[in-house]
Image (cartoon, grey):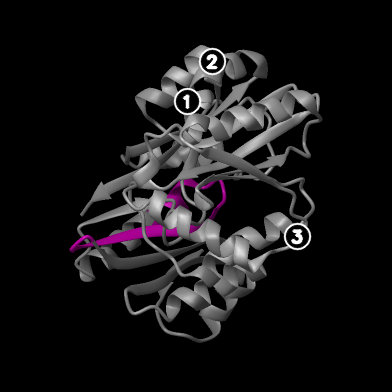
Amino acid sequence: MIMKIIIESGKCRGDFMNDLGEDKKNLINKYEKKNNYKIAYVLTENHNKITLRAIIFAKMYNGIKIGGIGMLRCGESYKEFRELVDKAELWFGKENVVKFYLPMDFNTFHSYRVVSDYFENPPFLLEQNIEPHLYRFIKYRGFKSVKKYYSYIVKNPVPVIHRLESFALRAKKQNIEVIKKEISKPDMRLLKELYEITDNAFSNAFLYESIDFDEFRNIYKPLINNNIGVKLMIAKINDKNVGYLFAVEDKYKENRWIVKTIAVKKAYSNAGVGALLTYDLYRRAVRFGIKELIHAYMSESISTKRFSETFGEIYREYSLYGKEI
C-alpha cells in the first residue's frame, strides 16, 4: 500500500474527487478558490483502490496559522491512520501551522467532530456517521479533546413546558412574538434572514468562521427539499427578526423531533428569546403527540448540563480533537 500527499491538480486529485459525493466535490472546489486556504490531499491506495483518503488544509485564524484534517474516510487499519497523521504533521510544519484539528471539513459549518461516547444508541436523522474505530485511533495517537458537544434526549416534553412558562411569559411582555413557518421549498428571502441571524449569534463560538450566503444556502436547501418535516419558528421584536429555531421530524423514529439549531442575535441573548422559542416548540410537539425531542450537537456548558440533568439525558457525546505542532 502506498500513501501519498497530492497538492497539484491532476490524476491523483481526480481519483480523490471521484471518491466523493457531489456536495463534497462542490465544497472542495469552492475552498480551493479561497485565498485564505491551502489544501492538500492524502490518499492510501492498494491495487489502485483507495483505502483511506483525507484533505489537509492550512488557514489563518485570529492571527495564527491553524490546520485541519477532514473529508476523512478511514478503514479499520490503525497503521494507515497513524501514517496519515505523520504525513499531515510534516505538511503542517512546512506550512507553519501552530495547531491542527480533526476531524473538520474546513470549518464548523460543515462536518466536524467524532462520536466519542454513548455509541450504543441508534442514530437519529441528520446525525453524523458513528465510527468507534476512528475515535479509538484518535485517542491512541495521543490527541486531546479540545471541545465536547452533546445530543440530549427529552422523553417527556410536559415538564419542560412547565419550567419555561414563566420565562416565556416574561419574553412576551417584552413584545417578543414567535412566528411559525411551514416551508417545503427554499425561500431565498427567508434563508437570507436566517443567515444573518446565524452569523451574528455564533460569531463568538469556538473556531467560528463566517461563510457567504451561497454556502449557507447550500447547507439548508437539502434539508428543506428532502421533505423531512421542517419546523421553523422565528422570534420577532417590533417586526424585526431576532432569533429562530430549526427542527425536523426524525424519520428514523416515529413521534420524535430533532432540534437542530437555536440561534439568537447577541443583542437579545438575555431577553428570553431562546426560552420562548423552545417553549412554543414543545407546546406544539405535545399537540402533535410527539413523545421525544433530541437537542442535537449542543456545546458543552453549565446551562446545557443543567438542562440535561433536569429534563432528559445524554444521548450522544461528540469531540473535536486538536494537537499543537
Q: Position of residue 85 (x, y in %)?
A: 36, 55
Q: Name the residue furthest bottom.
A: 10
Q: Residues within 10 Å of mark 2 (few under 14, many from 20)?
A: some
Looking at the image, tell me whether mark 3 or mark 1 is earlier in sequence order.
1
Residue 94 in the image: above or below residue 322: below
Which region of the structure is painted magenta?
A: 62-84
Residue under the image location 78 percent in, 31 percent down: 253
Secondary structure of the residue carrying tag 1 is helix
Secondary structure of the residue carrying tag 2 is helix
Distance of label 2 from label 3 (alpha carbons): 35 Å
Residue identified by numbered label 3: 225
Of residues 262 and 38, the one drawn nearer to the viewer in this rendering: 262
In the shown orientation, is residue 82 left or right of residue 309? Answer: left
Residue identified by numbered label 1: 170
Residue identified by numbered label 2: 163
Which amino acid, by three-letter code, is at mark 3?
Asn
Q: Residues within 10 Å of mark 3 (few under 14, many from 20)?
A: some
Dots 2 and 1: beta carbons under 8 Å?
no
Which quarter of the figure has residue 321?
top left
Q: Position of residue 281 (x, y in %)?
A: 65, 32
Residue 141 visible at all:
yes
Q: Is residue 241 magenta?
A: no
In the shown orientation, is residue 242 left or right of residue 228? Answer: left
Which amino acid, by three-letter code, is at mark 2?
Arg
Residue under the image location 74 percent in, 23 percent down: 286
Dots 2 and 3: beta carbons under 8 Å?
no
Q: Nearer the viewer, mark 3 or mark 1?
A: 1
